[in-house]
Image: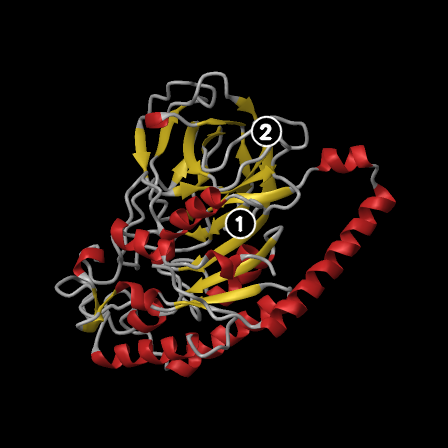
Amino acid sequence: MEIQIARRENFSARNSALRWAGLAGALAGVVMFASPLQAAELGNWIGTWTASAQPVWGPDFPVPLSMPTSLWNQTIRQVARISVGGSRVRIVVSNEYGSMPLKVGEARVALAADDGKIQAGSDHTVTFGGSPSIVIPAGAPAISDPIDLAVTPLAKVSVSLFFPEVSPTTTMHWDGHQTAYVAAGDKVADGDFKADAKQTQRVFLTEIMVDAPVDARAVVTFGDSITDGDGSTVDGNDRWPDVLAERFAKAGGAPVAVLNEGISGAKVLTDRMGVNALARFDRDVLAQPHADSVILMMGINDVGWPGCAIAPRDPEPNADDIIEGYKQLIARAHAHGMKIIAATLTPFDGAFDGTPFQGYYNPEKEKIRLALNAFLRSGAFDGVIDFDKVIADPQKPSHSQAKYDKGDHLHPNPAGYAAMGSAIDLKTLTTP
């Protein structure tokens, strides 16, 4: 089914005016400073895939990192399924949470094949300012030069990075749900990659961009593990944002990138498995070129964490605290001419029962979830996607339907994610 989403026409008009004002200024700059040939060479760059950067956590946190603490004289090959296609690509490598410079000795991009292999004839050298290597300062990202690799929508792209020096993996994306391949030495050009180790955590690679058609735009999905894809299939690309990207690709018309900026464990108000939503909103949402809409699905960890083993000493926030955070995100999105769509919080009755995280759910926390959902449906946002109604058991609304439950009573399984992605009315995410 498709859920119809309410829209605020007064905001749509203001949003369009702001976008066109910004576009007019940008076009004026092109006319003044760039010839048509130079403008074409500059390209129309837009994110086609993202993995939000997060810092590693310490040994006091009861969730294992399950990856090496550093890479040294090693190559890591990471695979990403993009959303929109383009005539050229660029990659973004981040040292945001590093405390020392990060040296990338060599990098290559190719079309991915199975099991870490690449498609013959698709391998391209990556350069940064014309150099095949780069040293990235602590706290900074690096964007590559354009690479002459044409990619189609939903293509799988392989990015290989060689680290010749000790490189602490302090900037990562923990719940990548995609196999990464690690081998000793400089193996970036190997077509048949012989991995010494595998992991599902991403390191350093945070974005792939494409030189897309001029009418391309982006939708950002901003959330926690249910957006990040806990419960989806490793290497299956069946998270709800993946389903949304597939629907846009099949719909035709102007290309729409879907950028997944979910972080498992993310919260609106406080840090731990990544910084809080208010702190990372500029980086992950507002800074994305050609992004005109954001779907927000976050808050269940603010409610569930306090009092269980994952955060035994954290105080329980009340609904008003989290709602104030939502209001800040609304105001900041609107200040940048961006629509912000709410996604309701799905049921979590029984979450983690019988595990070390017992206490994530209780009846008082359910009252907070219901209060948050009431606000998310209230009209304060520019629309609402009612994922709660998609996933909830009609006979027991505080529970997920068994057919959609991963088994921990919090995260959907692939069938649940398919139902969520299919329930979104695409018209809500089109520019008026």
Q: Is residue 127 above or below residue 142?
A: above
Residue 411 is situated, as x and y percent measured from the top left of the image, at 26, 58
- Disc 1 versus disc 2: distance between alpha carbons? 18 Å
The residue sitting at 33% across, 21% down in the picture is 194
The residue sitting at 33% across, 41% down in the picture is 67
Q: Nearer the viewer, residue 396 or 42?
A: 396
Residue 171 is situated, as x and y percent measured from the top left of the image, at 46, 47
- Badge 1 amino acid: Glu
Q: Is residue 171 visible to us here?
A: no
Q: Nearer the viewer, residue 140 or 287?
A: 287
Instruction: From the image, tell me which residue sits under label 1.
Output: 96
The reply, left or right, for residue 15 in relation to residue 370 is right
The residue sitting at 66% across, 43% down in the picture is 214
Q: Earlier in the sequence, mark 1 or mark 2?
A: 1
User: Which label number is shown at residue 133?
Assistant: 2
Residue 37 is situated, as x and y percent measured from the top left of the image, at 79, 32
Please identify the quarter of the rendering in which residue 154 is found: top left
Q: Is residue 124 above or below residue 55?
A: above
Q: Is residue 35 visible to us here?
A: yes
Task: Assign the N terminus to one quadrant of the image.
Answer: bottom left
Secondary structure beneath disc 2? loop
Residue 348 is situated, as x and y percent measured from the top left of the image, at 24, 68
